[in-house]
Image (spheres, helix red, strand yellow):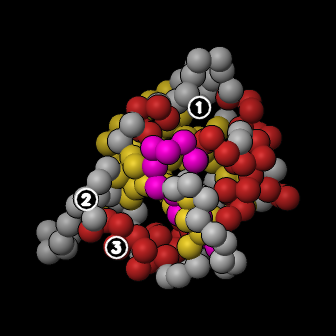
């Protein structure tokens, strides 16, 4: 069965964006030639799920080629129907049903690229199998929290910790499974 992974950066105090969706604090760890393991991670995925705001931000900052490169299926979770664009689908249905269907299909793993609403819905429905969280060495104080209150408790197993000379610390966790739990 395919797994769903998060690969995301957050401030030390738990924010993935400052107010007004400001991601400028991520720039403090940018370093020529350093991708913090993203290329190796991306080699094992063939499907991306993300929210509409995250999709719009990436299109503006990086460009369409980041998602629509012909190598991956992309599902943009949105409330507004739009036509398919290449391998990008704008999905207005139930996120849990989509992810359960995708996990049951053959293929590489599934990457949830954000945002917080999509991540937390997946966590609320126990659909995230792996979390790779990069901690940026900054306290931003306010903004969009990575983890919302009210989620069910979920036990995690530490797989790996990496430190980088930029001060970024990357934590990789896998969801602990109950012995009676399938998959």
For the residues bearing labels 1 and 3, Cβ distance under 8 angstroms: no
Q: Is residue 183 left or right of residue 3?
A: left
Do we see residue 28 in this rendering? yes
Crowd around label 1: few <14 · some 14–19 · many ≥20 (10 Å): many
Residue 74 belongs to magenta span: yes
- Res 141 seen here: no
Vertical arrangement, residue 120 with respect to residue 37, above or below:
below
N-term-proximal mark, 2 vs 3: 3
Residue appearing at x 27%, y 68% in the figure: 104
Residue in the foreground of this view, choosing between 18 and 59: 59
| Gap between marks 2 and 1 measured at Cα | 34 Å
The residue positioned 55% from the left and 28% from the top of the image is: 35
The residue at the far left in this view is 179
- Residue for badge 2: 106
Q: Nearer the viewer, residue 66 or 23?
A: 66
Q: Give the quadrant of residue 21.
A: bottom right
65 with respect to 140 (left or right): left
Give how far across and how far down residue 166 sits, in percent.
Answer: 63, 23
* Marker disc for residue 168: 1
Q: Secondary structure at mark 1?
A: loop
Check disc 2: other Cα within 10 Å, few if <14, some if 14-19, many if 20+.
few
User: For residue 101, which numbered disc appears in the image?
Assistant: 3
Name the element at disc 3: helix
Separation of marks 1 and 3 at Cα, in angstroms: 35 Å
| Residue sitting at x 46%, y 69% | 123
Instruction: Specify the segment rendered in magenta.
Output: 67-78
Q: Which mark is residue 115?
A: none
Q: Nearer the viewer, residue 105 or 29?
A: 105
Q: Is residue 174 above or below residue 125?
A: above
């Amino acid at each position: 069965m395919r797994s769903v992974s998060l690969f995301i950066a957050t401030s030390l105090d738990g924010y993935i964006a400052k107010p007004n969706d400001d991601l400028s604090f991520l720039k403090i760890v940018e370093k020529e030639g350093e991708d913090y393991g993203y290329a190796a991670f991306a080699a094992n995925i063939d499907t991306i799920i993300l929210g509409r705001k995250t999709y719009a931000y990436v299109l503006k900052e990086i460009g369409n080629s980041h998602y629509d490169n012909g190598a991956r299926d992309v599902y943009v979770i949105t409330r507004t129907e739009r036509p398919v664009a290449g391998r990008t689908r704008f999905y207005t249905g139930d996120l849990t049903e989509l992810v359960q269907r995708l996990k049951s299909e053959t293929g590489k793993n599934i990457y949830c690229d954000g945002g917080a609403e999509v991540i937390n819905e997946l966590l609320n429905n126990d659909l995230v199998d792996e979390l790779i969280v990069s901690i940026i060495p900054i306290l931003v104080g306010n903004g969009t929290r990575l983890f919302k209150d009210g989620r069910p408790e979920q036990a995690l197993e530490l797989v790996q910790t990496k430190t980088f000379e930029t001060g970024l610390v990357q934590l990789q966790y896998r969801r602990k499974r109950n012995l009676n739990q399938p998959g």
